[in-house]
Amino acid sequence: MARPKNKRHIILKAASTLFNQKGFHLASISEIAEEAGVGKGTVYEYFRSKDDLFLEVVTYNIQTYLERIEKVTLSKDAFLDQMDAFMAVHSEIISENFKATGHMLHTAASMEGKSKAVIQLILKNRHKVVDLLKGILLNGKVRGELSIDDLDFAADLIYDMIHRLSIRRCQYQLSIDACELERKKLMALTIKGIEHI
Amino acid sequence: MARPKNKRHIILKAASTLFNQKGFHLASISEIAEEAGVGKGTVYEYFRSKDDLFLEVVTYNIQTYLERIEKVTLSKDAFLDQMDAFMAVHSEIISENFKATGHMLHTAASMEGKSKAVIQLILKNRHKVVDLLKGILLNGKVRGELSIDDLDFAADLIYDMIHRLSIRRCQYQLSIDACELERKKLMALTIKGIEHI
Amino acid sequence: MARPKNKRHIILKAASTLFNQKGFHLASISEIAEEAGVGKGTVYEYFRSKDDLFLEVVTYNIQTYLERIEKVTLSKDAFLDQMDAFMAVHSEIISENFKATGHMLHTAASMEGKSKAVIQLILKNRHKVVDLLKGILLNGKVRGELSIDDLDFAADLIYDMIHRLSIRRCQYQLSIDACELERKKLMALTIKGIEHI
Amino acid sequence: MARPKNKRHIILKAASTLFNQKGFHLASISEIAEEAGVGKGTVYEYFRSKDDLFLEVVTYNIQTYLERIEKVTLSKDAFLDQMDAFMAVHSEIISENFKATGHMLHTAASMEGKSKAVIQLILKNRHKVVDLLKGILLNGKVRGELSIDDLDFAADLIYDMIHRLSIRRCQYQLSIDACELERKKLMALTIKGIEHI
DNA sequence: TATGAATGAGAGTTCATTCAT
DNA sequence: CATGAATGAACTCTCATTCAT
């Protein structure tokens, strides 16, 4: 079980890289196998089909995402440090997985059967992340750095804002400065409201 | 020139429907032709290639989007009515074009050559819509229903919020009630800020 | 019958030009119609099919060839002048119709049904030209410029030599000088024999 | 690498047969695959494209031609025997590859890019064969069976004569007798000159 | 277990031909 | 007569998947 696991992982990484670079349809099994340094047939030893491989890639990326974001945010104490860390990691991951993410969100429905599994995965992941964010906000409240009542809604909303900012950074290729500016405005706004800007 | 225009339009609609239902790669020319009730070759009488057809579909949908949203929002006077109308139409259109929209945003980069045209189209469209939204906000300010200074930033942000809400409605298949609730919270928040909720 | 004949002729010329430029398969009816300045359907008013059109082009070119070569050679008196004229015109025409000629000779068999007509045409044409050449040789003999007995064989052979030289000029893109040199050697040789060179 | 070479060769032969029978455009990859007894996709495992396959067929046939002609002519001693052998083999090969040969000579120009490679191949081949022929003539001279000075020219010319005779045999479907008669006259003539016939 | 040669369904695209106008 | 929009058969080529080794 030592080697298999390893090879499986190598293929998973290669697939993730290529789904990310070219999207689901334009990434071929041949390329993935080559990228992984294994034979084409070997891919089918570990994954039933291309759809299956894709599903596993999404699963893998989500797990990795959660692990990275948990590790980084929990290593900070202050509310704002945690928020910054969260945003930085989220943005970084979105950037790394941009095309694959886009794909998995938008054409999942056309995968028939497997799609529901993908959607379920994403929803479950979202809940976990929003929960994590809620913990950060609660921490801020406890530490007196923030005064919000509806933490559920706030967490959900802030997650969306952060996600959208990360997506836009990729889609419109925002410069780092532009990104930072938006980020600050965004933070101020979510806390104070538009009227105070 | 009497019929041609008509048939071109029929193919465009069929293509839009199928790109929407299955995404770019899974919607085949054969299917599009069948959906349009024409022969496969006829598609190529009106569009140079599948990529070209896709570009035209995006162009067409964006034009339609702008026309619909302008027409509806300009038929209202009060700020909040305009905002409601904007959100309703945007959400409706996103719902109708969900997959095609997703596709055009996420795999455009892999279309080589045509991709830039698609991205340009989308950016130009975004600017127009954000401008329209700024007009609505300005109207609210003029009417004393709203007091915001940085209209540019506010318009941009609100557009994203609305868009994200619309996307989520499709992705997570939110119920109408859940949607409405989020919408109201969103409106309140963008105006008052999280702290006031 | 005034207009039709004219339009038919225009299409024939256009088809000849394009079959010549691109060969049978790569010259499309659309292009031919465009080159002729008529509608695609019009081609089918005058010719049953593409194969039929091709057959008529070959017929037309052969007739033109015969007319040109007769006219030019009969305008000279001296044997060598006639020979030079013959070679010049033959070479010129081969050059003009290179691809179409090549095509009609080599893939005719794959045209099924029509092929036999084409081959018959070419054979009949060959006999006529060889006869014409025989006349020239006879003239030379009568004028005492040449002493050959087996005129039939000589004419046949010389025709082939001239034809091959013309073909090579096209295939290997011989310079005019190289061509002229070969031509002179050829003339000398056919008359005197290799041993005398 | 044991089997592959073999399958590649089978496909090459099948392609050669069909290009020969129907010409480049009318021989489809499906047919070639069927003739070779393999799947359509298999052809593309061994050859990048139809153009590539065609180029390889031409290369292969030229190599085979050279090998056969060298082997046969070098197995004779007497000048006339060598000449006879040369003519017989050349004629036989032309007959076998008639349409493909015709095609490669006449529509090569329309193959864009690959055409130059084909033309280069043919020219190189011609030089090799003419050299071989020159060797035969030299042999005849050395043995006192022939007295020619300009061997280069003679070899070139004789090659053309032989080629043309072979081509005519196919084009006009000459009977073996007619062919033999022409051949003898041709031999006599090239050596003695028309005037001596 | 690992491989890659073999496959064929299906993709996008072209074009000779037809026919309503 | 003249047209060109419409068609679909047939083409080249790709690629997910299988299976003998």
Image: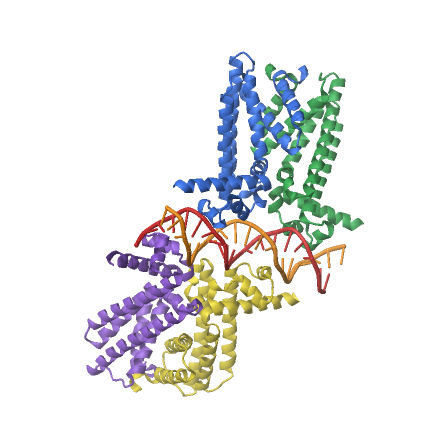
Chain colours: A green, B blue, C purple, D yellow, E orange, F red
Tell which of D170 and D107 is nearer to you: D170
**Quadrant holding the C terminus of chain B:** top right
Residue E15 to residue D138: above or below: above
Tell which of F15 and A170 is nearer to you: F15
Pinpoint residue A145: horizontal percent, then vertical percent.
72, 17
Pinpoint residue A179: horizontal percent, then vertical percent.
59, 28
Pinpoint residue C158: horizontal percent, then vertical percent.
31, 77
Tell which of B1 and D58 is nearer to you: B1
The reply, left or right, for residue B4 in relation to residue B179 is: left
Q: Residue at x 70, y 31 (%)?
A: A126
The reply, left or right, for residue B178 in relation to residue C126 is: right
The reply, left or right, for residue C93 in relation to residue E4 is: left
Q: Which image quadrant for residue A163?
A: top right
Residue D186 to residue D113: above or below: below
Q: Residue furthest right?
A: A1
Q: Which image quadrant for residue C174?
A: bottom left
**Quadrant holding the N terminus of chain B:** top left
